[in-house]
């Protein structure tokens, strides 16, 4: 039986919790300092005053938190992962943990990608969001999308009844009403959006301007790609996985199938997560340990 580590996609975080961890945990504090040196500002201070859940500083802080929690799990839980995965935003943390990308390069890339994404979705393709929803099986979703007489694209398949769809913001209210009418549960709207073939110009731009500055080594720990569940064992494979994240949908059930085929029984989810480590297709197939802030900040048990 094998063990895998999963770095989750990014969602809203509570600064008080994250900031406390970054200041108190020795590894996290050191990594936050390195990240601040890399981007040229104090990440914690900038994150504290951020107005967006997905601001540049928030994204860097999430990356640092995920990787510091993984180190904590190694030291305190004896985690020894043989495979790793990182759906959506978690791909950068997976690339780093696997040994394919250095930590400083990952921080630099995270900050630069935030800058490029903000510009692209403000100037080139404004008014697009990605909406997540549950309790909506595929057949129901097909019926709903068939009625949506405007551009849209499925961006994430998380479980048999859990999806994310990218669409124009002006059609979001209609989609939410239609999902509720079908018995579904609208959840969270992400802005900037993610994972659509329409974003190919952004993929091309960051490949030319940013990825050319980076060196991707062959990973020490194989990475399972979130777009198709393929196992990436080369630096070029990891690089392509990150770039394809702009234009290809996340297919989490395929990642689960691959991990099962690799004889994975235990999965550690390193980072604040409300999706990938909690959906039934994950919990019914693996022994899942959430490595989150609550666990890492828990006072140690007294010894006799």
Image (tube, helix red, strand yellow):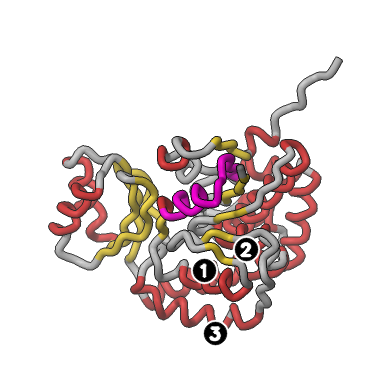
Q: Is residue 204 magenta?
A: no
Point out which mark residue 95 bears.
2
User: Mark 1 vs mark 3: which is more N-terminal?
Assistant: 3
Quadrant (top left/top right/bottom left/bottom right) for the N terminus: top right
Quadrant (top left/top right/bottom left/bottom right) for the C terminus: top right
Q: Quadrant of residue 34?
A: bottom right
The magenta stretch is 254-269
As drawn, is 191 to the left or to the right of 92? left
Q: Crowding near pointer 1: few (<14 within 10 Å), some, many (20+)?
A: many
As drawn, is 245 to the left or to the right of 144? right
Return the residue found at the far right: 304
Q: How far apart are marks 1 and 3 (CA)?
A: 16 Å
Q: Provide the residue designation for mark 3.
A: 208
Q: Provide the residue designation for mark 1.
A: 241
As drawn, is 88 to the left or to the right of 200? right
User: Mark 3 vs mark 2: which is more N-terminal?
Assistant: 2
Instruction: Return the residue nearer the eye: 82 or 297.
Output: 82
Instruction: Return the residue nearer the eye: 10 or 241.
Output: 241
């Amino acid at each position: 039986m094998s063990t895998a580590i999963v770095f989750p996609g990014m969602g809203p975080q509570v600064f008080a919790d994250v900031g406390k961890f970054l200041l108190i945990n020795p590894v996290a504090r050191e990594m936050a300092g390195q990240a601040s040196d890399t981007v040229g500002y104090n990440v914690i201070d900038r994150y504290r005053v951020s107005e967006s859940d997905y601001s540049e500083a928030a994204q860097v802080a999430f990356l640092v938190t995920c990787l510091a929690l993984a180190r904590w799990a190694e030291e305190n839980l004896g985690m020894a992962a043989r495979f790793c995965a990182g759906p959506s935003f978690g791909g950068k943390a997976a690339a780093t943990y696997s040994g394919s990308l250095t930590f400083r390069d990952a921080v630099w890339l995270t900050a630069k990608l935030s800058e490029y994404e903000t510009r692209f979705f403000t100037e080139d393709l404004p008014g697009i969001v990605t909406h997540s929803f549950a309790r909506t099986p595929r057949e129901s979703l097909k019926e709903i999308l068939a009625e949506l007489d405007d551009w849209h694209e499925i961006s994430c398949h998380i479980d048999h009844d859990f999806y994310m769809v990218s669409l124009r913001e002006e059609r979001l209210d209609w989609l939410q009403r239609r999902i509720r009418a079908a018995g579904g549960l609208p959840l969270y709207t992400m802005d900037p959006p993610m994972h659509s073939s329409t974003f190919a110009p952004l993929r091309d731009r960051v490949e030319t301007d940013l990825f050319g500055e980076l060196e991707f080594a062959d990973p020490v720990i194989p990475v399972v790609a979130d777009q198709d569940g393929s196992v990436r064992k080369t630096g070029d494979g990891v690089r392509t996985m990150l770039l394809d994240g702009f234009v290809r949908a996340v297919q989490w059930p395929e990642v689960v199938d691959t991990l099962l085929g690799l004889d994975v029984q235990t999965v550690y989810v390193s980072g604040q997560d409300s999706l990938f480590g909690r959906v039934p297709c994950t919990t019914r197939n693996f022994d899942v340990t959430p490595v989150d802030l609550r666990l890492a900040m828990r006072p140690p048990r007294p010894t006799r």
